[in-house]
Image: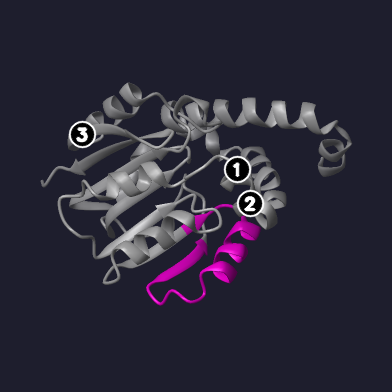
Amino acid sequence: MGAVRRALPLGLRTSIEKKLVRLLTKVAAHAPWLWRWRAIGWFVRGTFDPMARHWESNIARHGDWSAPLAAGLEQLPHAPRRALDLGTGTGLGASLIARRFPGCEVTGADISPRMVAEARRLHSGLPNVRFVEADSYSLPFNDSGFDLVTLLNVPPFFGEIRRVTAAGGAVLICFSLAERTPIYLPTPEVERKLLRHGFTAVRSGRAGKGVWTLGVKLVS
């Protein structure tokens, strides 16, 4: 399959991958059980593994990729003690949180092993951040283990997000280029999903070229 992918012209391959990633984002939000199909994980890893080495320079071409995440962090009701950055890629979001909140233990998780390896290399000097390989569909973390969960351009599995977020904790979902982001859900849809999954005080904003949505998990 990898040989077939490489045989396609770059422009065609990029177009197909963007459309499939957008489709899989909707699957994650509306039919997460379909993610059990192993071919989906293969596709996602196969798409992002080759990008790891040049990911930082590629996203730099779009301006401040992390602007909506930074803006959303300013709206948190309290400083987090344990944070999880899902789909961390090369660690941009996780490192931003670790620097913004030096007393917070930050975990960056990504399905791509090469992205995780690159994140570890780039941010080895940060003492309060670690990077692990994990699929956001089925996370290897305890229930209510984090008081902040962030997603920067990541398909949101709302059930898993709710499970790992502590009562009173926050979830922050961001898209760097708003509707132009390949991985994207419209803001009203994100807000509705958070409300249906037990989050309150849901609000959204824009920063740089992107958008953010913040919700706080209800205390039961």
Mark 1 neighbour class, 10 Å CA radius: few under 14, some 14 to 19, many 20 or more: few
Residue 100: image quadrant is bottom left
Question: Looking at the figure, which quarter contains the N terminus?
Answer: top right
User: Is 54 placed left or right of 190 in the picture?
Assistant: right
User: Is 96 placed left or right of 169 in the picture?
Assistant: right
Q: CA distance from mark 2 to mark 1?
A: 7 Å
Q: Nearer the viewer, residue 8 or 123?
A: 123
Above or below, comparing residue 10 to residue 111 in the picture: above
Asked whether residue 122 is drawn in magenta, I would say: yes
> Can residue 157 be seen at all in this image of the molecule?
no
Which comes sooner in the sequence, label 1 or label 3? 1
Name the secondary structure under disc 3. Answer: strand
Task: Report which residue position mark 1 lands on.
Answer: 61
Q: Which mark is residue 202?
A: 3
Q: Amino acid at mark 2?
A: Ser
What residue is drawn where x is 64% and y is 29%? Answer: 18
Position in image of residue 80 (x %, y %): 23, 60
For the residues bearing labels 2 and 1, Cβ distance under 8 angstroms:
yes
Position in image of residue 82 (x %, y %): 29, 64
Task: Report which residue position mark 2 lands on.
Answer: 57
Query: What residue range appears in magenta?
Result: 109-132
Position in image of residue 146 (x %, y %): 28, 58
Which comes sooner in the sequence, label 3 or label 2? 2
Name the secondary structure under disc 1. Answer: loop
